[in-house]
Image (tube, rainbow, N blue to C red):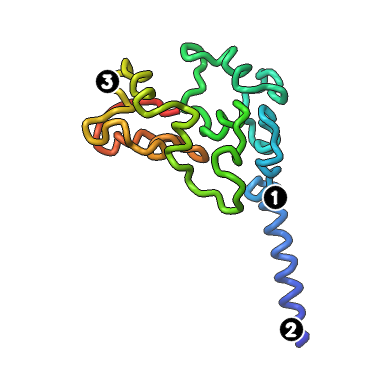
């Protein structure tokens, strides 16, 4: 019994040492602020440990997407493909409930929700008709009906679905 207590004490000390090393080295961090409580533009609410922005970047706490685009234009420091679509939505005043509804287990948003705000697939294809080498919103395989979620990710880096077979070099927002 005495040997067991001694082994438990040693294990507790070792666990404490491992935890201390993990915390001090950044391998483990306290949970971040819940995303639902983060205000648009308050990057530090979620990006506590790592710099989300360059040091000389203006304070973002009161910024929205319109303010971001004042500097970040299509031709100058474009944000396309730089952060997840959820950031663009949040900075534009669209919260999680607007797309997912009030649910504890959010699921992938149906394409109908996307086109309700972003316009019909035919209108999207018209907007991107001049994109080279080919229009990303219309294809000989799927027409204009390819599910938005296959390319446009909200909580991960977006990807070019067509690149599985083709060599189209798009920056997918």
Residue named by callout 1: 23
**Which residue is identified by label 3?**
133
Task: Tell me if residue 69 comes above or below residue 139 in the rendering.
Answer: above
Find disc 2 in the rendering and name its residue: 3
**Mark 3 or mark 1, whichever is nearer to me:** 3
Give the answer, above or below, for where 50 lies relative to 18.
above
Residue 142 image offset from top left, x and y in percent? 26, 35
Helix, strand or loop at label 2? It is helix
Looking at the image, is mark 1 or mark 2 earlier in the sequence?
Answer: 2
- Rendered image: mark on residue 162: none
At 46% across and 27% down in the image, what residue appears? 118
Q: Position of residue 33 (x, y in %)?
A: 70, 43
Q: Earlier in the sequence, mark 3 or mark 1?
A: 1
- The tag earlier along the polypeptide, 2 or 3, is 2
**Element assignment for label 3:** loop
- Distance, label 3 to label 1, CA atoms, is 48 Å
């Amino acid at each position: 019994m005495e040997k067991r207590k001694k082994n438990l004490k040693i294990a507790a000390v070792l666990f404490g040492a491992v935890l201390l090393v993990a915390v001090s080295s950044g391998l483990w961090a306290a949970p971040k602020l819940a995303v639902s409580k983060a205000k648009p533009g308050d990057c530090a609410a979620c990006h506590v440990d790592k710099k989300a922005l360059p040091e000389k970047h203006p304070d973002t706490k009161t910024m929205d997407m319109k303010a971001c685009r004042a500097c970040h234009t299509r031709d100058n420091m474009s944000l396309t493909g730089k952060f997840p679509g959820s950031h663009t939505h949040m900075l534009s005043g669209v919260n999680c409930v607007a797309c997912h509804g009030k649910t504890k287990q959010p699921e992938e948003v149906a394409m109908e929700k996307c086109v309700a705000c972003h316009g019909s697939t035919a209108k999207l294809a018209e907007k991107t008709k001049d994109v080279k080498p080919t229009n990303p919103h219309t294809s000989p395989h799927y027409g204009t009906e390819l599910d938005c979620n296959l390319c446009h990710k909200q909580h991960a880096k977006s990807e070019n679905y067509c690149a599985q077979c083709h060599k189209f070099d798009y920056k997918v927002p």
